Amino acid sequence: MIYWQIFLAFFIPGILGYGGGPSSIPLIENEVVNTYGWLTVHEFSEMLALGNALPGPIATKMAGYIGYQQGGVLGAIVALFATIAPSMILMITLLGILLKYKHSPQVKKMTQLVRPAIAVLLGIMTINFFVSSISKEGSGYIHTIIIGVTSLFLLEKWKIHPAYVIAGALVYGAIFL
């Protein structure tokens, strides 16, 4: 029964919390504090402060913590699944609809309009990463050039799988940085 309660405590805020983790925090608090009484308001606020100090999405961190506290490892797994399940179900449903109508002129036009926006966003992200890597706080010009040129040759000339190139860059960074 506890696993079903854990599932409901995080699935319902996942459905109703439009806007992601921060918007679902009051809904999670209502379930955890008021409905099930697993935490006090003070304990919840301390957990929220600690969760905000850690990297990553706040809703999944809270779900993992509370799920583990109430039901052990299986409780954490159930809570994490319940947190991501609404988004996952929606994405699978929307992808199914998109694939069903992929030959529709409207869908083709939509994907043609979205591609340039994605390209611009990826380009901006790449420029920001590059500027950050050559700054004094980053790895500097020499390391950026070495990693960039080596990656280019490995990917384009020798057709090495990107996972191996990323792993090699991580090893390079661990050794020289």
Image (cartoon, rainbow, N blue to C red):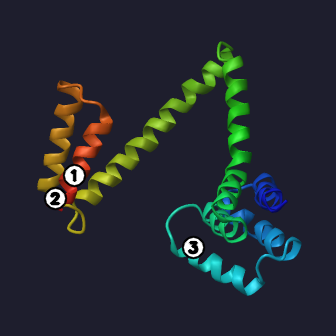
How many marks can you see?
Answer: 3
Alpha carbon distance from label 3 to label 1: 30 Å
Label 1 amino acid?
A: Val
Describe the element under mark 2 as helix, strand or loop.
helix
**Residue pointed to by mark 3:** 52
* Relative to 170, residue 2 above or below: below
Please provide percent x and percent y for residue 48: 64, 76
Estimate the spatial distance between the alpha carbons at disc 2 and disc 3, rounded to whole Å: 31 Å
Q: Are marks 2 and 3 in contact (CB under 8 Å)?
A: no
Amino acid carrying label 2: it is Ile
Q: Residue 62, image x and y in percent?
A: 65, 67
Furthest residue toward right: 35
Q: Residue 86 — which label?
A: none
Q: Residue furthest top?
A: 103
Q: Are marks 2 and 1 in contact (CB under 8 Å)?
A: yes
Q: Examine the rendered structure and indicate whether residue 95 appears above or below residue 53.
A: above
Q: Quadrant of the C terminus?
A: bottom left
| Left/right of residue 137 with respect to residue 145 in the rendered view | right
Please report the residue visible at 19 percent of the width from the left and 32 percent of the height from the top.
Answer: 154
Q: Upstream in the sequence, badge 2 or badge 3?
A: 3
Q: Dividing the image into 4 quarters, which one contains the N terminus?
A: bottom right
Residue 68 locus on image (x, y percent): 65, 67
Mark 1: which secondary structure? Answer: helix
Which residue has dot 1 on it? 171
User: Which residue is identified by label 2?
Assistant: 175
In this view, the mark in front (3 or 1): 1
Residue neighbourhood size for the residue with mark 3, other residues' Cα within 10 Å, grouped as few (<14), some (14–19), many (≥20)? some
N-terminal label among 3 and 1: 3
> Which of 174/112 is in front?
174
